Amino acid sequence: MKKQYLSEIMDHPLLGKLLPVDFSPLKTCSFNCYYCSLGKTTKITMEREEFYPVKDVFQEVDSYIQQNDSPDTIILTGSGEPALYSKFGELARKIKEKYPSITITAYSNASLLTDPEVRKDFCECDVMQFNLNAVNAEEFRKLNRHHGNVRIEDVLEGMKKFKTEFNKPIWIHSIFGNNFNISEENIIGLRDFIAEFKPEKYIIRKFEIENDVKPLSNKTINFIKSHMDSLDCECKYMGFD
């Protein structure tokens, strides 16, 4: 079957057999992150749209599962920021209603969480994942190269508000890059925010694609670990070996 909205099932170390579902044109996002594996953002926006009909996306998901082994987890990604898909909640509900044993998750930059409708849509997930690389405004901007309407204060407040409305697991990811977000102020600030937020998992990574960025020094890696190891949540280091 030719797939428009799906990738192949992949093995994920934390989510098992993972089926990615896409519902936005490449690449539509509120950020233009330096390290993004999808490349440069071609449409940087904060406006939600129904990029593709939800019935078409669901039909392809449904047909695929009927004809193949069922995944453990479906990740609703979009080719960028998933909150920009205005039918996110409807799509998640339709999948969950037919396949209640499959975990539904999404990976978001949290930039639209000030919108109550976005928070409501994300509440349809079983596990919600947020990317947070900086709490320092300058480092946040330098690494994420975000839309002009995004403010780190709103991102952090939106995450806190969402946590009060979502009674299921939240994972936070931080990705560190040399000369981007590794100041002592930012690392300690992230630790303090995570300590207050108390996610179920905190996942810490380095840039997978170095480009012209030098690898993190052992001193920086040890500094990150020395502060994050004290957190009262499950802390996962990926790519730090």
Image (cartoon, grey):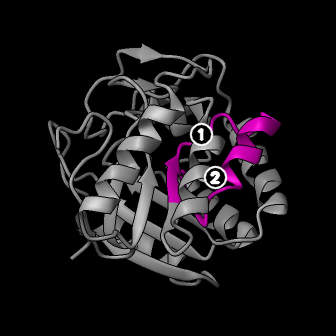
Image-based side of 241 in relation to 160, left or right: left
Identify the image quadrant of residue 179.
top left
The crowding category of the residue bearing disc 1, from other C-alpha atoms within 10 Å (few below 14, some 14 to 19, many at least 20), is many
Q: Which residues are magenta?
A: 105-132
- Taking depth in this image into account, of 226 and 53 the one nearest to the observer is 53
| Residue 184, placed above or below residue 39 | below
Q: Can you see residue 135?
A: yes
Q: Position of residue 72 (x, y in %)?
A: 39, 73
Image-based side of 105 in relation to 224, left or right: right
Pointer 1 residue: 88
| Residue 27, placed above or below residue 121 | above
Pointer 2 residue: 93
Q: Position of residue 7 (x, y in %)?
A: 24, 48
Whether 41 is among the magenta residues is no
Q: Quadrant of the N terminus?
A: top left
Q: Position of residue 118 (x, y in %)?
A: 71, 39
Q: Can you see residue 217?
A: no
Q: Quadrant of the C terminus?
A: bottom left
The crowding category of the residue bearing disc 2, from other C-alpha atoms within 10 Å (few below 14, some 14 to 19, many at least 20), is some
